[in-house]
Amino acid sequence: MAPRNPPRAISRRSVVLAGTALALAGGRAASVGAAAAQGGGVRPYTIRFSHVVAEDTPKGLAALRFQALVQERSGGRIGVAIYPEGRLYGDHDEMQALQLGAVEILAPSLSKFGRIGFAEFELFDLPFLFPDVASVRRITQGPLGQRMLARLQRQRLVGLGFMDNGFKHMSANRPLLTPGHFVGQRMRIQASRVLDAQMRALHAQPVTLPFSETRRALALGVVNGTENPISNFWTQGMHTVQSHLSLTQHGYLGYAVVTSQRFLSALAAPDRTLVREAMREAMAFANQIADAQNDNALAALRAYGGTRILVPSAQDMVQLRAAVQSVHQGLAKRIGPQWLQDARDALKNAG
């Protein structure tokens, strides 16, 4: 079975996008605008929502909730087509597709914004910055998170909000409980300078791969291990190719839901409000179920019995934290120390 998004196929698709999507998007925006002009948006149209995870993850379920809300509240006038698991666009090309108008809504992981010019989003990748989900939300639902979303306007993107997927844990075909266990391991990561630095600080070799190719790469030994929330680990079948899961809870994985200014401005004002409100409710739903989904996946893993689930000791955690402190310093130098200071202040001053 070939990977869903092999590099050459992505390359070819990107060329097609570059050549045709501007015309396609222009025509689509015009048709949406015309629909809005003729009776407040009476003619039906479809919002394309692309993402790279399974439908039974928090993000996948949020997309389905958004679909149901939009279609119900518009009386079927507005449709939502969902493309999960990278079936339409993958990690390499989804942002380009959005900017060119070939898709209307994405929910990329926060790591992906660094490589398109918003390095401050890599704050969320820092290991051991957040002790729990409540602390994450002090950023995402506070002034700092709103400032980050507002900056997306520089590339004509509109940030609709944040969604949780929970905390990441390390997996491999061996325990990964202390820095010594990582030495020489090839670890799949998202394209993030922070995650690259994190693995190097642990003396592992970081390998950037699209999410949709990760399980196959693990099965073939292209990489030895990876990091994921348990819901992703379970729904992608990584437990069938990884013998050990170490519950390190070292990093957070979340998403920013984004659309384009061009698409949003083409909607009639009532439809714009409808879309924003439906997405707000869908994101709240995802945030409510994220912990439960990860707990359910962990229970399923324990019942499966084929993957050894390990819990680091207090001393293990002290060693892991110490090993990656340089990653925080490196990011502060790159994006300016004020971003990190503002994040720490928000965490310290809350409640």
Image (spheres, rainbow, N blue to C red):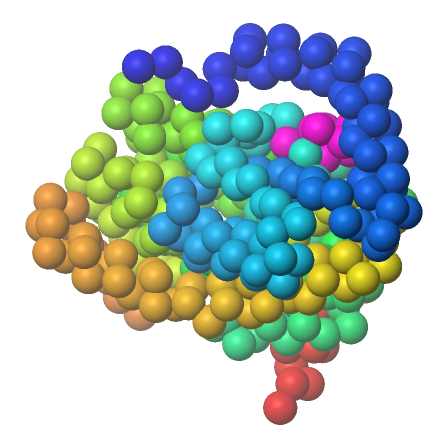
Is residue 247 placed above or below 114 in the rendered structure? below
Residue 3: x, y in percent?
A: 40, 18
Is residue 277 placed above or below 93 in the rendered structure? below
Which quarter of the image is occupied by the N terminus? Answer: top left
Residue 142: x, y in percent?
A: 72, 74
Can residue 319 be seen here? The reply is: no
Q: Nearer the viewer, residue 56 or 200?
A: 56
Which residues are drawn in magenta?
94-102
Which quarter of the image is occupied by the C terminus? Answer: bottom right
Residue at 36% from the left image edge and 51% from the top image edge: 56
Residue 101: x, y in percent?
A: 76, 31
Residue at 81% from the left image edge and 62% from the top image edge: 270
- Position of 132 with respect to 142 (left or right) is left
Residue 296: x, y in percent?
A: 26, 62
Q: Nearer the viewer, residue 247 or 97?
A: 97
- Position of 321 with respect to 159 (left or right) is left
Q: Nearer the viewer, residue 78 or 14?
A: 78
